[in-house]
């Protein structure tokens, strides 16, 4: 078995998207012949119609290469609509849904993988509130109900299928920002490990990072915008899974050549699926 995916995040169509990078990705991804393209949120900057329309055109270009799995990030949520009001949910996601469909947390069942999206971008919500005022509508949170839904999908997966969890906010502490994307991040990490995922794909922090979290491979993608941290050249991931290993390849932006080039990789041995009780 050999399965590959391309993982992109945080394009932020609008003022900060880097169109040279976007166009290079549109050219390169079909050549990589992936089985799946994952976009882990923040396709827009302010959830404006024009931004979401360009994002939709990008998703359609990716769909010529492979099935696309996309979820919203905090920038794609109109959080200023009905903040903290119960049942205000529909308004917050209405625009995103108009361009990417009703399903905010799509699930895909492919021959070699089960992909479960979970929602962490809730806008201004009780579960995401932290003492830092500037974090209003920026932090995410991972409700137990979300992870239980993913766990159910992973439990039903066939043994040979790779279990892939997709969420927007960074699960690992940002190497440069020193920040966690999720409120109550320790509980969130425990829940993610308990879900039975083999691979977790996230973004939000704009810094590429790959680590194993109690045996679960976590890949935080960088951004394809001008907002990369520390002036580092942006990176997207190609991830290859076979019977022996999971390999996360970094494709790094070469501004002088106007192309992404494979720079280095992380490799992890495959492990047997583990499903545990989910922390409350
Ligand atoms: Fe974000």
Image (cartoon, rainbow, N blue to C red):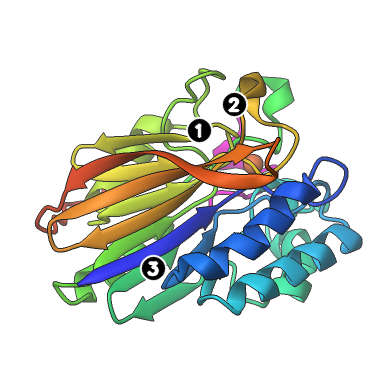
On whether residue 261 falls in the magenta region, the answer is no
Question: Which percent across, then down, holds residue 123?
Answer: 69, 46
Task: Please indicate whether residue 262 sits to the left or right of residue 280 in the image.
Answer: right
Which quadrant holds residue 190?
A: top left
Task: From the image, give the main secondary structure of the stretch colored magenta.
Answer: loop
Q: Which range of residues does the magenta coloring cover?
A: 118-129
User: Is residue 85 visible in the rendered structure shown here?
Assistant: no
- Asked if residue 19 is positioned above or below residue 242 in the image, the reply reads above
Residue farthest to the front, as pictured:
257
Q: Are marks 1 and 2 in contact (CB under 8 Å)?
A: yes
What element does badge 3 sit on?
A: strand
The mark lying in front, picked from 3 and 2, is 3
Question: Which percent across, then down, holds residue 126?
Answer: 60, 40
The mark lying in front, picked from 3 and 1, is 3
Sort mark 3 into few (<14), some (14-19) or many (20+) by Cα contacts within 10 Å. Answer: many
Quadrant in the picture for the N terminus: bottom left
- First in sequence, mark 1 or 2: give its number: 2
Q: Which residue is mark 1?
A: 183
- Asked if residue 193 is positioned above or below residue 113 in the image, the reply reads above
Question: Which percent across, then down, holds residue 166?
Answer: 45, 56
In front: 280, or 46? 46
- First in sequence, mark 3 or 2: give its number: 3
Q: Which residue is mark 3?
A: 115
Task: Please indicate whether residue 50 sits to the left or right of residue 138 in the image.
Answer: right
Q: Which residue is mark 2?
A: 130
Sort mark 2 into few (<14), some (14-19) or many (20+) by Cα contacts within 10 Å. Answer: some
- How far apart in space, not on screen, are marks 3 and 1 (Cα)? 24 Å
- How far apart in space, not on screen, are marks 3 and 2 (Cα)? 30 Å
């Amino acid at each position: 078995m050999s399965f590959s995916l391309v993982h992109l995040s945080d394009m932020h169509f609008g003022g900060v998207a880097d169109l040279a990078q976007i166009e290079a990705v549109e050219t390169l991804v079909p050549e990589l012949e992936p089985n799946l393209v994952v976009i882990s949120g923040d396709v827009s900057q302010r959830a404006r119609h024009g931004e979401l329309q360009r994002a939709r055109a990008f998703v359609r270009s990716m769909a010529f290469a492979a099935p696309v799995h996309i979820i919203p990030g905090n920038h794609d949520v109109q959080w200023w609509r009905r903040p903290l009001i119960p049942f205000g949910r529909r308004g917050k996601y209405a625009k995103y849904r108009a361009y990417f469909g009703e399903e905010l947390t799509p699930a895909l069942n492919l021959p070699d993988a089960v992909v479960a999206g979970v929602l962490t971008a809730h806008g201004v919500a009780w579960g995401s509130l932290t003492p830092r005022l500037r974090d209003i509508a920026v932090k995410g949170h991972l409700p137990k109900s979300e992870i239980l839904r993913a766990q159910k999908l992973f439990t039903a997966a066939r043994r040979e299928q790779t279990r892939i969890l997709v969420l927007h906010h960074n699960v690992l502490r940002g190497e440069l920002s020193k920040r966690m994307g999720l409120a109550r991040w320790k509980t969130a990490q425990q829940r993610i490990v308990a879900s039975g995922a083999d691979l977790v794909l996230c973004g939000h922090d704009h810094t590429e990072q790959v680590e194993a979290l109690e045996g679960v491979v976590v890949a935080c993608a960088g951004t394809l915008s001008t907002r990369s941290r520390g002036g580092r050249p942006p990176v997207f991931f190609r991830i290859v899974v076979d019977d022996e290993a999971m390999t996360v390849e970094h494709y790094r932006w070469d501004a002088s050549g106007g192309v992404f080039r494979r720079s280095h990789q992380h490799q992890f041995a495959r492990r047997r699926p583990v499903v545990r009780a989910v922390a409350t």
